[in-house]
């Protein structure tokens, strides 16, 4: 199996391969559903003012972006860049989980999103990264790029909480 920067030959991954690249999208949907009712109020209490409407509207393009990455990563002859982005988003959800759990401990209250962070995002990240390693989907450099991109996305997502 030769992996190039432009295309990645498809292994016979049956159903499990494409499903694994849909995990970031599924995690995002479930996590956002937990956050939606109370996250804006929680952010307004601990960081900067945020309305539920702003939170919801800002998530629409993000959800569509993760959907696009998962979809493109599972297409026949998908470029490795789409796989890197799907893995990057999954890494971002792991860092987001650390944020939720850390702020819940720091502030001593429920951080909306922490339940799915702990029970969905962290196990899903372990699953995706273990699968990626076993299948050798990405090279070391590509995986490093995915982790770097995911870290930057997580930092930006946390950073916007301080904007008022």
Image (tube, rainbow, N blue to C red):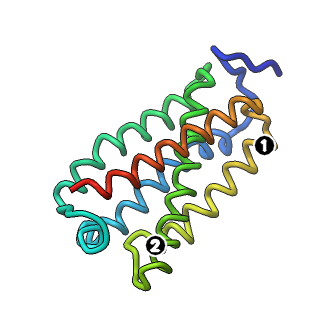
C-alpha distance separating marks 1 and 2: 31 Å
| Residue holding disc 2 | 103
SS label for mark 2 = helix
Badge 2 crowding class, 10 Å Cα cut-off, few under 14, some 14 to 19, many 20 or more, is some
Q: Residue at x 65, y 42 (%)?
A: 15
In-front residue for pair 125/110: 110
Q: Give the vertical position of 23 relative to 81 (above or below).
A: below
| Residue holding disc 1 | 133
Look at the image and tell me in which quarter the C terminus lies.
bottom left
17 displayed left or right of 64:
right
Q: Nearer the viewer, mark 1 or mark 2?
A: 2
Number of marks in the image?
Answer: 2
Look at the image and tell me in which quarter the N terminus lies.
top right
The x and y percentages for residue 44 are 24, 69
Q: Residue 118 carries which label?
A: none
Name which quarter of the figure residue 28 lies in: bottom left
The x and y percentages for residue 79 are 59, 21
């Amino acid at each position: 199996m030769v992996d190039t920067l432009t295309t990645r030959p498809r292994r016979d991954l049956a159903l499990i391969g494409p499903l694994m690249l849909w995990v970031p999208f599924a995690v995002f949907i479930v996590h956002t559903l937990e956050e939606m009712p109370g996250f804006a109020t929680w952010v307004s209490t601990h960081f900067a003012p945020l309305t539920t409407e702003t939170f919801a509207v800002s998530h629409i393009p993000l959800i569509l972006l993760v959907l696009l990455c998962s979809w493109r990563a599972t297409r026949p002859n998908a470029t490795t860049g789409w796989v890197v982005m799907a893995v990057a988003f999954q890494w971002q959800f792991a860092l987001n989980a650390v944020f939720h759990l850390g702020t819940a401990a720091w502030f001593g209250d429920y951080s909306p999103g922490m339940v799915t962070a702990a029970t969905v995002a962290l196990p899903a990240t372990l699953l995706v990264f273990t699968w990626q390693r076993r299948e050798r989907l990405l090279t070391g450099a590509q995986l490093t790029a995915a982790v770097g991109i995911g870290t930057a996305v997580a930092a930006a997502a946390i950073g916007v909480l301080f904007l008022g």
